[in-house]
Amino acid sequence: MTTNLRLPGRPEELTLPALLVRNAAEHGELPALSWREGAADWRTLTWSEVRHEVAVLAAGYAALGVERGEHVLLMMGNRPEHWLSDLALVHLGAVPVTVYGTSAPEQIAHIARHSRARVAVVEGAGELARWEPLLRDPTAPLERLVVAEAAEAGPHRTYASVRSDGARLHRADAFEKGWRETRPEDPLTVVYTSGTTGDPKGVRLTHRNILLQSVRLDRDTDLPEHAEHLCYLPFAHIAERILGIYLPLLRAAHVRLVADPTAVAAAVRERHPVQFFGVPRVWEKLAAAVKAVLAGLPDEQQRAIEGACALARARAGHRERGEEVPAALEASYAEAKERVLDPLLRMAGLDRLVWTASATAPMPIDVVRFWAGWGITIMDAWGLTETSGVCTVNRRDAFRLGSVGRPIEGLELRIAEDGEILTRGATVFDGYLRPDGTVERAHDAEGWFPTGDVGRLDEDGFLWLTDRKKELIITSTGKNVSPALVENTVKEHPLIGQALVHGDGRSYLVALLVLDPELAPAWAAARGIGTASLAELAEHPAVLEETARAVAAANARLNRTEQIKRYRLLAEEWGPQTGELTPSLKLRRRVVREKYGPLIEELYEAQPEPPR
């Protein structure tokens, strides 16, 4: 259901602290925030306890010298110190800015200088090594570091000492007076884009931007009130800021922090959530894990599962077209779901899901169809940091698999002549932060913001993404090619986990293909290939033959310009740590092209055979 909790005012007139007042007063005993302390059980704060902690921390940060309007940088994982500090700074009128934990020293230095932050709150020794040089850098205004892990703080202030000072200095009247001075048009946060190219840009979002976004997104989702959210994506990602901080305050929901994002599958198995959000790469990885398990099951059980999945996909097709599901199909699906699918979903913790979503990049249609076969309809959405999160969403009563849905309330879309998607509305940001604190407008005279994405609107108003405008390949013959379309097509084969297509200024396309680390070993084992490493599999004749068939099958579905003429199979998975993916798991094409430049050139040295 859409939340029907009382709002303490009109959404466009509210600030975030007003929601915390309501939650403490009207839902004070409900769980608000949970986290693990070591290997122990979950520790939980109620909404009334959260507000008390926020008030204490606000006094502590004020004593540290944090002032209204200034930026404070945060680099911590999904831990209570991060979540509570974010809210405490907002109550002071300061502007929290989360920095990706995987950021390189030069990226950190850029953000520190650009934001003019004097204070940064970091997790421990791993972060200090990248931040301490800035304290000695005359070009950076950074003056002080606060460290969450007390044992690793060294000469720096600890989070515990900031809280201790706050507990001693907190005065209720000053706290209440302080947050009431905040206005809806004031900045709530600055989110630095993760930067697939160039330096990150600072996107300034106001209380009004975020609260209108939260209210409108809430209207387009169907969740039980006070639902639990597994919070595992970085808070530097706009999606987790919305889903893990701002929407829970609107809904008086329960945030469960998952400090290690690689442990999210285990958390899902433990908690059996009713909602789950994952970027496309997360859904791809989960699907690969399920397929790897299925590959080891007896043939009879595999056939039973595929039969049940076929019923689920047929049912989803009727719902997608807005048709009533035939009674016989509904009955067959219900029986197969209970007998075949539910026991397996229960083992994975996926049996209670009522809302599943994805965003940030086009979702491969084979992944969407795979999950539809398990009765899980992923409501793909689209948006940007600059639009406070989503612009379009699929809804349970109106969706098209493969599309990113229809616009949220109050947001307009327009497709430019070159295919670029333009948008305007109250949830679109004012502009990019300049180093002097002013804002550089990013709209045209009529208020339209060019998103950089290319797409089309169908006759029913659903948006279909093509690619990023800057990432479109223009061949030497002048043809435009969407690399994401080609890559997602070849990735439909279970052996291929990742792909990059190259061909800008060339007469044909080449590709780098990466073996899927979960499915490739399972595929090999099922065919009697021993316990070979991924590197050995990438050179095994059977794997190479199957890869050739996968490319040929993909090419058969693509036009001549889009077809892959030459490729190379790689064994090493790409990730944020090795630089090929952004922290939000988007492909950094420039980095991959530079890293594998000689290999790409080799693919062009010999002309491929003419396509059949």
Image (cartoon, grey):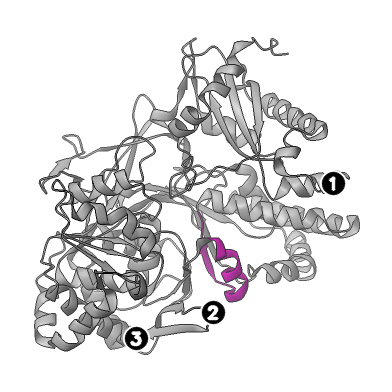
Can residue 7 be spotted in the picture? no
Q: Amino acid at mark 3?
A: His
Point out the stretch of residues depicted in magenta. Answer: 262-278
Give the residue at mark 1: 530
Give the residue at mark 2: 39
Identify the residue at horizontal 28%, vertical 79% (top origin). Answer: 160
Query: Left or right of 206: which side holds 288?
Result: right
Give the residue at mark 3: 27
Query: Left or right of 70: which side holds 373?
Result: right
- The residues bearing labels 1 and 2 have C-alpha atoms spaced at a distance of 36 Å
**Toward the viewer: 454 or 3?**
454
Q: Earlier in the sequence, mark 3 or mark 2?
A: 3
- The residues bearing labels 3 and 2 have C-alpha atoms spaced at a distance of 29 Å
Closer to the eye: label 3 or 2: 2
**Toward the viewer: 386 or 208?**
386
Q: Earlier in the sequence, mark 3 or mark 1?
A: 3
- The residues bearing labels 3 and 1 have C-alpha atoms spaced at a distance of 57 Å
Numbered marks: total: 3
The answer to whether the residues at label 3 and label 2 have Cβ atoms under 8 Å apart is no
Q: Amino acid at mark 1?
A: Gly
In the displayed structure, 71 sits above or below 442; it is below
Can residue 108 be spotted in the picture? yes
